[in-house]
Image (tube, helix red, strand yellow):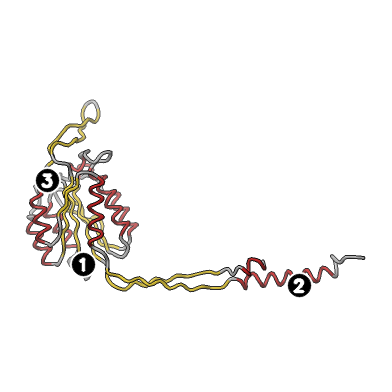
Amino acid sequence: LLIVAVARPQASREREIVRGRGVDIVLAMAISGSMAALDFEPQNRLEAAKQVIGEFISGRHYDRIGIIVFAREAFSQCPPTFDYDVLRRLLTDVELAPHLGLDDGTAIGMGLAQAAGMLQNSDAKSRVIILLTDGVNNAGQIDPLTAAQAAVALGVKVYTVGMGRPGQVPFPVDSLFGQTTQMIESEIDEETLQRIAETTNALYFRATDTEGLRQIYDQIDQMEKSEVEVQVFTRYRELAGWLLLPALGLILLEMLLRHTLLRSLP
């Protein structure tokens, strides 16, 4: 006990104070049937996107992040939150529209408008949408460029990501003999995605594999840094006293027993 006490054990308690503002981010992602394409092997497009987006979320610390998914309609998967555990769990639950029984399609304008609406009441200095799609706008009542103008009015930047290899890509198909693959044409309206990004003073990216997609989100992560100052205060509490008291008691007990029950005779 004395040896451990001399080592001066301590208990510490940290308190973190954050000053400044983070970034409010909405991740808008397509869940149309074409996201089942297998050009991001060994995963399909949707699973590759979920993996990379999950890594992106894990790299943020002081930002509110929300998720929008869209096919023929747009849906709120998670409102902007600091609870990243809930956010990652809801991201894991994202599935293709046909698997959810939803009408298929790609309503880029609806997804963008819904994402901008999430940031309407945000008081963050920086508000960002990262819109990921692998197709052409073919559904919804809102034109993508009209939604981009609405984002500009709200002071929101929209980074757009086109996902998919050009040309023919493998696509899973159910048949009488089980699941097979057939080649389909990969179509992305890059011009519209570029115009959305330019209109909102942001950038357009094209990802043709998982590593390329990861690099895109890493680049956006570097460009949209939180402007916060973190101060950590640590308070230490000495624990040696809890060891010295029983040590003193044992010493006194040893002195007492040495002259009574444990005394040595000549």
Across and down, in percent, residue 54 comes to 30, 52
**Left or right of 132, for residue 232:** right
Using a 10 Å C-alpha cutoff, classify the residue at mark 2 as few (fewer than 14 neighbours), some (14 to 19) or many (20 or more): few
Asked whether disc 1 touches disc 2, contact meaning CB atoms under 8 Å apart, the reply is no
Which residue is identified by label 3? 188
Q: Dividing the picture into quarters, in which one does residue 121 lie?
A: bottom left
- Quarter containing the N terminus: bottom right
Task: Quote the CA–CA distance across marks 3 and 1.
Answer: 28 Å
Residue at image coords 27%, 52%: 53
Give the amino acid type for the residue marked by disc 3 in the picture.
Answer: Ile
Q: Dividing the picture into quarters, in which one does residue 65 lie?
A: bottom left
Which residue is identified by label 2? 252
Q: Name which of mark 3 and mark 1 comes first in the sequence.
A: 1
The furthest residue to the top:
177
Using a 10 Å C-alpha cutoff, classify the residue at mark 1 as few (fewer than 14 neighbours), some (14 to 19) or many (20 or more): some
Residue 126, disc:
1
